[in-house]
Image: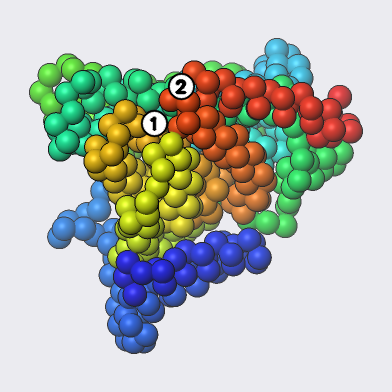
Amino acid sequence: MENTIYSLLPPLLAILMVILTRRVLLSLGVGIVASAFLLADFSIPKTFSFIWDALKGIFVADGGLNTWNVYIIFFLLILGVITAFVNISGGSRAFGEWAMKRVKTRQGAQLLAAVLGIIIFIDDYFNALAVGQVARPITDRHRISRAKLAYIIDSTSAPICVVSPISSWGAYIIGIIGSILTAHSITEYTAFSAFIQMIPMNLYVWAAVLLVIMVAYKGLDFGKMKEHEVRALETGDLYDPGKEIPGELKNDLPVSSKGSVGDLVWPIVALVIGTVSMMLWTGYQAVGSFDLLPIFENTDVTRSLLYGGLFGLLIALIFFLRQVSLKGIEGSAIGTAAVEGIKSMLPAVYILIFAWTIVTLIDQLQTGTYLAGLVEQSNLPMQALPVILFLVAGIMAFSTGTSWGSFGILLPIAGEIAAATDVSILLPAMAAVLAGSVLGDHCSPISDTTILSSTGAGSNHIDHVITQLPYAVIGAVVAAIGYLVLGFTGSTILGLAVVIILILAFAFLFGEKAKPASAE
């Protein structure tokens, strides 16, 4: 069943069930069983063996600890405890009151969240969780639904990381580009200069970022997003209380009346400084010199997140103990904070474990390889290559839940096709792969970055997927038109101009119709 059309069935089954049942763990579980069943050639004992091996691989790899996955889980749990400490210390309350005096409109709160997402471009995991911690007290005060916040976070994390050379994404992509240029003896440009030239060609990124800014500025709420926004405005319910919310503290915790803005800001600052410093240090250890791009190419992202999280937790604990000394809270609340903080992140951890399991099995089914083979075997007109690669990369990332996996498979194929036919189409073709992979990642309920965006915002995961999907589709349609223009004219400027004009036209034509009636 590997590398055949049947390999598409498990991811499509899981995604369809997610949409129909809105029960993410059940749907992922069905996808896991279906994947293992196909891999085992319908043998029940072998099916359980494949599932066990995939599950075990999340925690153990190559005879040792799978630090990538384990460190992410620990980071999530640490972040939950930091959140509980900050809330009990009164930091979230004080920051919300401070922000309400300065950010006076819903529009301003949404734009602030978008700007924060653009500024924190080092890593998409870190972006999704850190922006949520800072922006949530502000957006909550302005009755902005958690689904809207999750959309803003998701649309400014991976899209910004994929065009930033100084990021974990940029370093990974530049490494792949370098191998492609070497394999085909292309010397007109270096891997770094190729990446820089591809930035304006990454049309879905610019469509998504411009659209999220216009959504914040014009109030472009439609479909399920409008339902969430209207409910938040009219009832104050920022999410459906009957649904599971990862990252949300379940029980009412004591809150210090003596807390200050610093009780929230300094732990977050420590988290940022600690994480970025560790990324630079682990990269330097691997490279042995202070060359920024190789440092980010070789940095240990998850170890940096773990140590940065521990540093942030230490600072949060110090401020928590300060509130105890000020008699703002009881010292016994420290145990409550730890337990409730960990419990708040368990739903996200469960979803991640299930998502990682199905992604492992889908990889063994070679779903991505099958889709990539279809591209290689078809006789494509060169002018249509960028838009076709964009769509195929989108389908691949949507089905497999990983944009990085799509990069690794499709970028070399784009290089082969361009080198064998028309090398001038190489950069647009590779840019289209990057753009399509981010699109598929945005739409996929089994994507880890989508899961972490839900967690950072405190939104129900399926609500985030369903509400974001129409915006992602609009960005995809606009980007596809842009790639047709780029392919047939050879002009990056024209392709980008078409994207900008179409997004702005959509925003101004539909802005007033989409705005919730009580938005003002």
Q: Is residue 74 left or right of 395 when viewed as pictured?
A: left
- Residue at the spot 43% in from the left edge and 75% down from the top edge: 33
Dot 2 amino acid type: Ser
Q: Specify the farthest residue to the right.
A: 517
Dot 1 amino acid type: Pro
Q: Residues within 10 Å of mark 1 (few under 14, many from 20)?
A: many
* Residue 411: mark: none
Which residue is denoted by mark 2 in the rendering? Answer: 491
Name the front one of labels 2 and 1. Answer: 2
Q: Residues within 10 Å of mark 2 (few under 14, many from 20)?
A: some
Task: Give the quadrant of the C terminus.
Answer: top right
Q: Specify the farthest residue to the left.
A: 288
Q: Is residue 86 left or right of 389 when viewed as pictured?
A: right
Residue 438 horizontal/vertical position (percent): 46, 40
Residue 22 horizontal/vertical position (percent): 64, 62
* Residue 428: mark: 1
20 to 129, vertically: above or below? below
C-beta proximity under 8 Å, tags 2 and 1: no
Kindly tell me whether residue 44 is visible in this rendering.
yes
43 to 315, vertically: above or below? below
- Residue at the spot 39% in from the left edge and 39% down from the top edge: 382
Badge 2 marks a residue whose secondary structure is loop
- Residue at the spot 52% in from the left edge and 52% down from the top edge: 444
Q: Specify the farthest residue to the top.
A: 102
